[in-house]
Image (cartoon, rainbow, N blue to C red):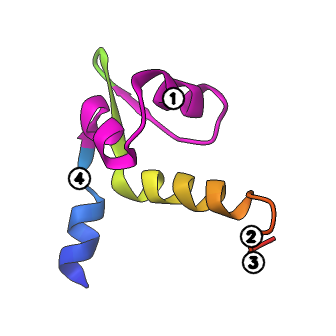
Amino acid sequence: MVVQMIQDDVLLTFKEAMNYLRVSRSTLYRLMWSGQLTGHKVGSTWRFYREDLRACVGREIASLPGSPLN
């Protein structure tokens, strides 16, 4: 449990977030600009918490038609 919390606190780079979600660069930017994904600007680069990426995916699944979460 503690290990899981520590792993969630690690910030991922833009490229790592793209790989984690398996989306293109433009899709990741679209998710950010639409407010579906929270990113954090560190210097000149974007960073993402793994938990924020998971939450974004969870919202996408819940919004699909016929989802049991609707």
Q: Residue 30: image x %, image y %?
A: 58, 26
Judging by the rendered image, the residue that carries numbered circle 4 is: 10
Judging by the rendered image, the residue that carries numbered circle 1 is: 27
Nearest-to-viewer mark from 2 and 4? 2
For mark 2, give the secondary structure.
loop
Q: Residue 39: image x %, image y %?
A: 45, 35
Q: Are marks 4 and 3 in contact (CB under 8 Å)?
A: no
Mark 1 packing: few (<14 Cα in 10 Å), some, or many (20+)?
Answer: few
Name the image quarter holding residue 2: bottom left
Q: CA distance from mark 1 to mark 2?
A: 22 Å
Which sits earlier in the primary sequence, circle 1 or circle 4?
A: 4
For mark 3, give the secondary structure.
loop
Vertical position of residue 7 compared to residue 52: above or below: below
Q: Residue at x 25, y 39 (%)?
A: 16
Question: What is the number of the mark on residue 67?
Answer: 2
Mark 2 packing: few (<14 Cα in 10 Å), some, or many (20+)?
Answer: few
Determine whether, in the image, residue 36 is placed left or right of residue 68. left
